[in-house]
Amino acid sequence: MSTRIGYVCSVGIARCEVAPNRRIAIPIVPGIFKHLACEDLPGILQNPVAARKYTVEALRVAPWQVLREFDRRWLTECLDRADLTAGRRAALEFMLRL
């Protein structure tokens, strides 16, 4: 299933166990990891380290329309690692209601 939002479109979902007994769904979006093809992402994003790196990069570059498809708790956990500009961080914190 794909979700089309403007020009950005998720093309699927990867599932990852990020902690014992905690699985999250991660939207697969072209362009977040520029060096990997979308068809490679479901397998790669099963690794929690890769899932975190992907989410951190999404926080840096993806529009809110994409980020709202992520688990909010997971986004919040990854926020400090994203090294965002003050304005982007404030906007994301507002959208996440932190």
Image (cartoon, rainbow, N blue to C red):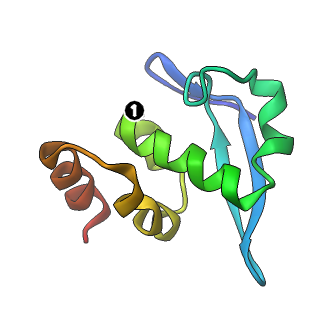
Give the residue at x 45% y 69%. Answer: 77
Q: Position of residue 45 (x, y in %)?
A: 75, 48
Q: Position of residue 49 (x, y in %)?
A: 68, 57
- Mark 1: few, some, or many residues within 10 Å (few <14, many ≥20)? some
Note whether 45 is above or below 1 in the view shown.
below
Instruction: Give the side of residue 46 with respect to residue 6, left or right.
Output: right
Note whether 20 is above or below 10 in the view shown.
below
Residues 43 and 71: in front is: 43
Amino acid on which the number 1 mark rests in the picture: Val
What is the quadrant of residue 1 in the picture? Answer: top right
Give the residue at x 31% y 49%. Answer: 83
Instruction: Give the side of residue 53 with respect to residue 85, left or right.
Output: right
Instruction: Give the side of residue 96 with respect to residue 46, left or right.
Output: left
Q: Which residue is mark 1?
A: 61
Note whether 82 is above or below 80 in the view shown.
above
Give the residue at x 72% y 24%. Answer: 36
Q: Residue furthest top?
A: 7
Give the residue at x 54% y 53%. Answer: 70
